[in-house]
Image: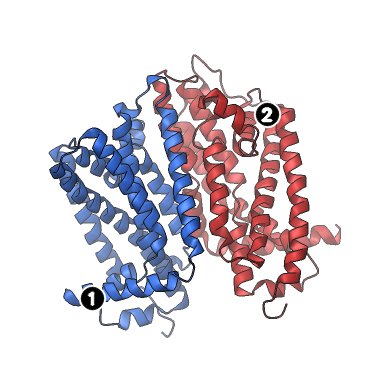
Chain colours: A blue, B red
Amino acid sequence: MRRYFKTLGLFWAVSVSAEMAYRTNFLITSLTTLLTLAGALFTIGLLFQNGHTPGGYSWPAALTVLGVYTLLDGLQQSLLAPNRTALTEHVRDGTLDFVLLKPVDAQFWMSMRRFSPWGLTDVAAGLGLLGYAGWRLEISPLGALSGGVAVVLGGVILYAVGFMLATLTVWFVKLYNITIAMAALLEAGRYPIQAYPAVYRTFFTAVLPVAFMTSVPAAALRGEAGAGWLLGLAVVSGGLFAASCAFWRFALRFYTSASS
Amino acid sequence: MSAWTRRLRAFFGIEYALMLTYRAEILLWAIATCLPLIMLGVWTQAAESGDFVHGPAWMARYFIAVFLVRQVTIVWVIHHFEYLVVSGRLSPQLLLPVDPVWRYAVAHLAEQACRIPIVAVMLVGCLLLFPAAWRGDATVGPWVPGWGALVGGALACMAAFTLRFLLQYTFGLFAFWLERVAAVHELVYLLILFLSGMVAPLEVFPAAARDAVLWTPFPWLVWFPAKLMMGEPAPVLRGFVTLGVWIVALAVVNRVVWIRGLKHYSAMGA
């Protein structure tokens, strides 16, 4: 276990120093984050016109959902997306062989090897939003702690779904658009799940667990999530993580490397 | 058939075959374009309350129209062009006796053609899920687009595609000088995303914001074609003039930057 932490530190140190060659990117990503945030606040603001409350949410409550979304979006840009792209490239070039031969778990390598600091501005914006909403809603430290755990579980779901999609490259070879598709699907998590029609709610809970990525963790932060939802979050999160591991091992059986 | 159309047809054949090779990716592309369908859910549900100027039937119809507009105006040339310049693979294309812009434009059309079956399924699904969109309700009549709506909508979509393509390609040309132009263009895309009517119809914007936004090119890219498709009254003259002026202006800038850029381009073989 300690070896894995040490490896992780090395991975990320190397990745970050490589990315530091492009420092103007910091300016661009900061502007992108600010503009995205302004646009999202504007759009949600439109929903709050004429005394309307989408899904019965108050303004700060809706901000907790947006905050969790922004946080996960940052996680996606920093960690999940770069590694998914790398996986696609390895399969396409046949260089996945080298990864499989290394003395660390291949899924760990393929999920953690790359780290791009450019999603951190979104992580910061998400934390800022959550801090503001938490102050407005007077969330207790204990609530913040349990909410934090729920957000991590939501992140695990996002990771597992994305990793399973990326694993499909073993059969389909070229799937560069996974990142765009995943970002588009997570987009649904910008708005509270209760603000959708019933069909959407079922779809985003049972088929594509977007509700468990943003709305449920946000409700946990506010201390409004029932025990059933929290249990559901834990089960979906653990189940999807296990499924992503099993699917990865299954897919590797079909991987015909560059040399064979 | 002139040599010109023969060339374009050859390009189309090549690009269509290339796209079909990786069909699974086209499916992901289609998923990536479902943002209007997400917003369709949010806004029809919000309109149920009666707190907004339009009811759920109108909202559903609007976002289905936006979905269609988006399907035919998707542009990705900047990512492709940035890769070609940074990797130096643009060089062999410059040896051909055709300006490569034609090939990129045709590639977009080929990609749209590949997406048709998926889009058709998604469209039928939406119309079944939201029957009020075509049937109408107490506030809006049934959705029967007349010839004016069909022709006007199609023309507006073509103009919107041309403008978005020119905008992105012109930004892309700066790849001759800068790395990662796609990241810079992302900022423009965000403006299109939030101000074009893709996430909310202009009708629900506060009046001052709506008037200001109408002076930018953004709403004419999505809101305007969608309104025409719905068969609703829209500022037709202003829309086509705005689109036309921007297209001409960007085409001129594009050619100037292209000529300067080629002089600056120094990859192997250039």
Pinpoint residue B35: horizontal percent, then vertical percent: 47, 42
Q: How many marks?
A: 2
Could you tell me which residue is drawn at 71 percent across and 42 percent down? Answer: B159
Viewer-closest of B89 and A122: A122
Q: Quadrant of the N terminus of chain B?
A: bottom right
Question: Residue reaching furthest right?
Answer: B2
**Res A170 visible:** yes
Q: Residue at x 36, y 75 (%)?
A: A14
Query: Residue A215 vs residue B264: left or right?
Result: left
Indicate left or right for B182 with A17 as reference: right
Identify the residue shown where x is 24% and y is 59%.
Answer: A241
Q: Amino acid at mark 2?
A: Ala
> Residue B258 lies in what quarter of the image?
bottom right
Tell me where residue B29 appears, x and y as whole percent. Answer: 50, 53
Q: Which residue is mark 2?
A: B149
Task: Have a look at marks 2 and 1 and say if they share a chain.
Answer: no
Q: Mark 2 packing: few (<14 Cα in 10 Å), some, or many (20+)? A: many
Relative depth, front residue between A223 and A175: A223
Q: In the picture, residue B12 is in which quadrant?
A: bottom right
Vertical placement of B245 versus A15: above or below? above
**Which structural element holds mark 2?**
helix
The chain carrying label 1 is A
**Structural crowding at the residue carrying mark 1, measured as other residues with C-alpha within 10 Å and reported as few (<14), some (14–19) or many (≥20):** few
Residue type for callout 1: Lys
Q: Which label is found at residue A219?
A: none
Question: Mark 2 — on which chain does it sit?
Answer: B
Disc number for residue A6? 1
